[in-house]
Image (spheres, coloured by chain):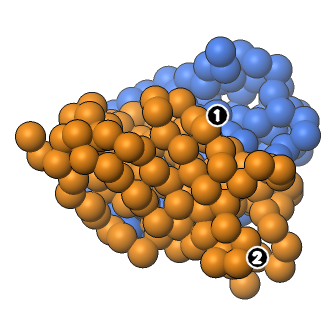
Chain colours: A blue, B orange
């Protein structure tokens, strides 16, 4: 089974702090994704990566950056957290054919005070 | 614009009753279609997927979905709901690129 692990399940940060969310997958998947989930809005794509050191903006990249130095690891960075970034963050991965079938981690719930 | 719509924000079903969750899509061509389930505080788990072929798709946990091209729908069904099915359900579509589009979700409540 594919396992996608998000290192932090719950985080509480203060406005202006730098936040790192880490995600590791163990199935040698080429593609990795960061989504944000908010009630009534479904999942919105922040960034994705199709290869090491490669990244592409999704639909809502503002205020976020990402890093993919190793194939199995994809990090989401909030340079200066703001209260409107309080949300559930979901990491996902998919294989090379990328039909859209995604394997998700358990999520990281971030609260920014 | 491409979109996936789940018309029902929440649904309440009695345990043992049948269930149908609605999903409509808008794409230029038939997309790959998926249903995911999310239990409280958890990530999303794939229930089933439709790529092509047989329009009735079987999934895990006793779920099935039917693709209807004429109605641009991909509704999820289960003949008899269990209390453990209470969760949020997401329909999603993809054209094979990197941007899977998710519906807003339908929260299922199961009453005893």
- Location of residue B63 with respect to A111 vertically, above or below: above
Is residue B72 toward the left or the right of residue A78 in the image? right
Residue at image point 66% right, 49% down: B56
Q: What percent of the width, then of the height, locates residue A55? A: 82, 49
Q: In the depicted view, which residue is nearer to us: A54 or B90?
A: B90
Could you tell me which quadrant the N terminus of chain B lies in? bottom right
Is residue A107 toward the left or the right of residue A25 in the image? left
Q: What percent of the width, then of the height, locates residue B13? A: 21, 53
Is disc 2 placed on a helix, strand or loop?
A: loop
Is disc 1 placed on a helix, strand or loop?
A: strand
Residue B7, by quadrant, is: bottom left
Residue A108, by quadrant, is: top left
| Number of other residues with Cα within 10 Å of mark 2, as a class: few under 14, some 14 to 19, many 20 or more | some
Q: Which residue lies under the disc numbered 1? A: A103
Asked if badges 1 and 2 are on one and the same chain, I answer no
Compute the Cα span from label 1 to label 2.
Answer: 23 Å
| Number of other residues with Cα within 10 Å of mark 1, as a class: few under 14, some 14 to 19, many 20 or more | many
On residue B27, the disc is 2
């Amino acid at each position: 089974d594919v396992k996608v692990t998000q290192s932090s399940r719950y985080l509480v940060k203060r406005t202006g702090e730098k936040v790192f969310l880490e995600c590791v997958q163990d199935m040698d998947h080429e593609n990795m994704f960061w989504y944000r989930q908010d009630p009534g809005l479904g999942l919105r794509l922040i960034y994705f990566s199709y290869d090491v050191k490669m990244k592409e903006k999704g639909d809502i990249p503002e205020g976020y950056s990402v890093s993919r130095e190793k194939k199995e690891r994809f990090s989401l960075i909030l340079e200066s957290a703001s209260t409107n970034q309080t949300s559930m963050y979901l990491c996902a991965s998919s294989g090379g054919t990328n039909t859209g079938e995604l394997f998700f981690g358990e999520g990281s719930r971030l609260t920014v005070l | 614009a491409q979109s996936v719509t789940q018309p029902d924000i929440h649904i309440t079903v009695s345990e043992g009753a049948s269930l149908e969750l609605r999903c409509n899509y808008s794409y230029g061509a038939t997309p790959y279609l998926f249903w995911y389930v999310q239990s409280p505080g958890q990530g999303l788990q794939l229930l089933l997927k439709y790529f092509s072929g047989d329009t009735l798709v079987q999934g895990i946990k006793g779920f099935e979905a039917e693709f209807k091209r004429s109605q641009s729908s991909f509704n999820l069904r289960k003949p008899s709901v269990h209390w453990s099915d209470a969760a949020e359900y997401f329909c999603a579509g993809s054209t094979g690129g990197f941007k899977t589009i998710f519906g807003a979700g339908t929260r299922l409540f199961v009453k005893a």
